Image (cartoon, rainbow, N blue to C red):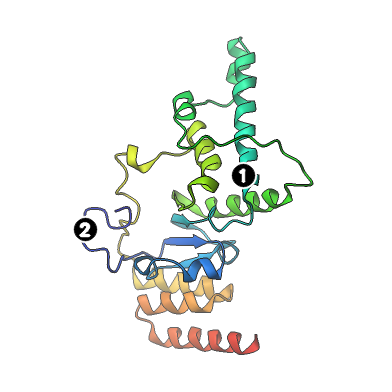
C-alpha cells in the first residue's frame, strides 16, 4: 500500500533513482519480498555517503545483532518523562524535549525498561550508529517497516513519544512514499556512477539498465563478476 499508493498492482513496484531500500546485510537483502526487489536495495554499509529522497528501512530491528538491549531505550524514555515532571518553571520546561504522553500511554507492547550497562550492552552502541547512518541517508522521507514486534517496540515507542514519527495507520499521508516520480536516464546514469565508485556493481548495473544504458550495465556486471572471482 505504501509503495503503490492507489495503484492496484503490487507485482512489480517501480522505484525511482532517488529512492532506496536499506537492509542490514546480504541475508536480509535476499529475504526481501519479490515486490521490493526491483529497485535500489543496499545494505546500510553500502549506503554510506549516498543520499536519496526517500528511504525504506526494512527489518532493521528484526535483523539487528541487539535483542533485549533495545529495552534500554524504554528506560531512557522513562527518565526523560521523570525529568520533565520534576521541573515546573516554563523556562526549565522549554529546555527539555517535547513529549507526546498519549503515544507513550498507548504503547503497542509493554516494553520492560533495561538500565544501560556500557559493558553488557556494547552491541547497542554499534546498532545505534547503524540506525543513525540509515536515517540520515534520506532528504525527505524515512519509512520504517519491521516484522519483529518485540525488538522494534522500544524504538518505535520512543520515536512516537518524541513526535519524531507517525504510525501510517493513523496518518493520511500513508500513500505518499513510493509514488516514485519518473527518473530520467540521466538520473539513473548518475546513480549508477555513484554506485560504481563505491564498488556496488550489482546495483549499479540495475541503475544503468533502468536508464537504458546497456553498455554501462555490461561494464558494471563485468566488474561484479570480477569482484566475485576475487573473493
Q: Percent x, y for residue 95?
A: 62, 22
Residue at left 77%, top 43%? 118
Q: Secondary structure at mark 2?
A: loop
Quarter assignment of residue 4:
bottom left
Task: Give above or below for 175 relative to 8.
Answer: above
Q: Few, some or many C-alpha atoms within 10 Å of disc 2 (few <14, some 14-19, many ≥20)?
A: few
Q: Few, some or many C-alpha atoms within 10 Å of disc 1 (few <14, some 14-19, many ≥20)?
A: many
Residue matched to label 2: 7
The extreme top residue here reads 89
Q: Percent x, y for residue 9?
A: 22, 63
The extreme right residue here reads 119
Residue at left 50%, top 74%? 193
Q: Quadrant of the C terminus?
A: bottom right
Q: Nearer the viewer, residue 159 or 32?
A: 32
Q: Percent x, y for residue 178?
A: 34, 56
Q: Nearer the viewer, residue 123 or 112?
A: 112
Residue at left 49%, top 51%? 148
Residue at left 51%, top 66%? 28
| Mark 2 vs 1, N-terminal side | 2
Please state if 89 lies on the left or on the right of 205 as rendered.
right
Residue matched to label 1: 70
Q: Are marks 2 and 1 in contact (CB under 8 Å)?
A: no
Task: Give above or below for 212 relative to 104.
Answer: below
Q: Percent x, y for residue 14?
A: 31, 66
Task: Give above or below for 95 relative to 33.
Answer: above
Which label sits in the foreground, 2 or 1? 1
Tag shown at residue 1: none
Q: CA distance from mark 2 to mark 1?
A: 36 Å
Please state if 125 lies on the left or on the right of 150 as rendered.
right
Q: Nearer the viewer, residue 74 or 216?
A: 74
Q: Secondary structure at mark 1?
A: helix
Amino acid at each position: 500500500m505504501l509503495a503503490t499508493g492507489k495503484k492496484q498492482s503490487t507485482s512489480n513496484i517501480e522505484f525511482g533513482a532517488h529512492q532506496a531500500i536499506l537492509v542490514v546485510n546480504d541475508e536480509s537483502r535476499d529475504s526481501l519480498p519479490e515486490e521490493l526487489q526491483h529497485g535500489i536495495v543496499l545494505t546500510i554499509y553500502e549506503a554510506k555517503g549516498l543520499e536519496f529522497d526517500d528511504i525504506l528501512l526494512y527489518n532493521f530491528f528484526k535483523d539487528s545483532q541487539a535483542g533485549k538491549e533495545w529495552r534500554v531505550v524504554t528506560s531512557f524514555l522513562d527518565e526523560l518523562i521523570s525529568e520533565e515532571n520534576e521541573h515546573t518553571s516554563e523556562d526549565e520546561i522549554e529546555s527539555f524535549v517535547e513529549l507526546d504522553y498519549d503515544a507513550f500511554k498507548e504503547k503497542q507492547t509493554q516494553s520492560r525498561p533495561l538500565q544501560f550497562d556500557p559493558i553488557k550492552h556494547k552491541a547497542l552502541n554499534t546498532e545505534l550508529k547503524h540506525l543513525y547512518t540509515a536515517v540520515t541517508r534520506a532528504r525527505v522521507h524515512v519509512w520504517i517497516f519491521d516484522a519483529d514486534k518485540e525488538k522494534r517496540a522500544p524504538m518505535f515507542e520512543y520515536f512516537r513519544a518524541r513526535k519524531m514519527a507517525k504510525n501510517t495507520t493513523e496518518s493520511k499521508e500513508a500513500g505518499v512514499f513510493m509514488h516514485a516520480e519518473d527518473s530520467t536516464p540521466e538520473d539513473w546514469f548518475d546513480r549508477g556512477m555513484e554506485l560504481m565508485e563505491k564498488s556496488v556493481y550489482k546495483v549499479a548495473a540495475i541503475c544503468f539498465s533502468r536508464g537504458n544504458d546497456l553498455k554501462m550495465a555490461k561494464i558494471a556486471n563485468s566488474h561484479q563478476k570480477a569482484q566475485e572471482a576475487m573473493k
